[in-house]
Image: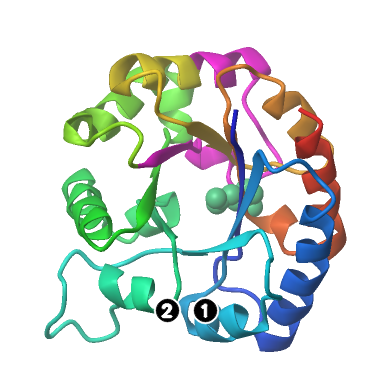
Amino acid sequence: MTRYLISNWKMNGDRASAAAYVAALSEKLATVPKGLKMVFCPPVGLLESVRQSTPPGSRITLGAQDCHHATHGAFTGEISAAMLKDLGVTYVILGHSERRAMGETDEMVFAKAGAALNAGLTPILCVGEQRAAYDAGKTFETVGKQVELLKSLKSGDYLIAYEPVWAIGSSQTPQMAEISAAHQYIKTVLGSRVPVLYGGSVNVGNIGEILALREVSGALIGGASLENEQMAAMIDIASKK
Ligand code: PGA
């Protein structure tokens, strides 16, 4: 089974740190079984320099953190999926909770997913409940609404990242049984072939336990993905799961 490690740098890093990162992690990835895939999602302004500094034969795949739903036009500050493709990008994170917090809706995420697929990108679609919904036992209900539109997409064309909003950058995670259940629920709704990744305070200490869960196909890692050594250690752990 393919396992995915998505490194989401958010708005962090520069050309030098990203170049050192891809050099170190390409070396690390060369030592682990092929079933492990690493997708590096730096800020959009670093994509070109990352592509250029990635050593030939590297197993690191390039990802972006967002795209616009339109192919081109008067959208100041935005970037289209085709432009990302042209930059050598393969994956794109869509609907991250930090973007939903800026007003992105399920409909917008769905439109972006269509644009990404049309351009030949693989969307990594983020879903997850707020703390209040978790506390109220409404995780499935919330996630169910978020994935409703995605039912029309072909399974196998995209990945889901289940990221409880309250777990992101908080050092808190759900119980392992809750992670399992949420992943199972998403697979029941969207199909068992859809890879579902977990995200939210994944680190060297908990990634082994999380990836040991049968329903979990990988991890989307924010803060802990920024450091070369931590990411290398997580690659090691993930390669043994
Ligand atoms: P975190 O971020 O690992 O820092 O919690 C995860 C994410 O936002 O995707």
- Percent across and percent down for residue 40 are 60, 62
Q: Quadrant of the N terminus?
A: top right
Front residue of 206 and 83: 83
Q: Which residues are magenta?
A: 158-181
Binning the other alpha carbons within 10 Å of mark 1 as few (below 14), some (14 to 19) or many (20 upward) gives: many
Is 178 a magenta residue? yes
**Residue 51 in sight from this viewpoint:** yes
Residue matched to label 2: 87
Q: Residue at x 18, y 82 (%)?
A: 75
Name the side, left or right, on which 110 lies relative to 198: left
User: Would you name the residue on which mark 1 appears?
Assistant: 47
Question: Residue at left 33%, top 20%?
Answer: 191
How many numbered discs sit on the rendered protein? Answer: 2
Amino acid, disc 2:
Leu
Q: Quadrant of the C terminus?
A: top right
Q: Is residue 109 above or below residue 226?
A: above
Name the amino acid, label 1. Leu
Looking at the image, tell me whether mark 1 or mark 2 is earlier in sequence order: 1
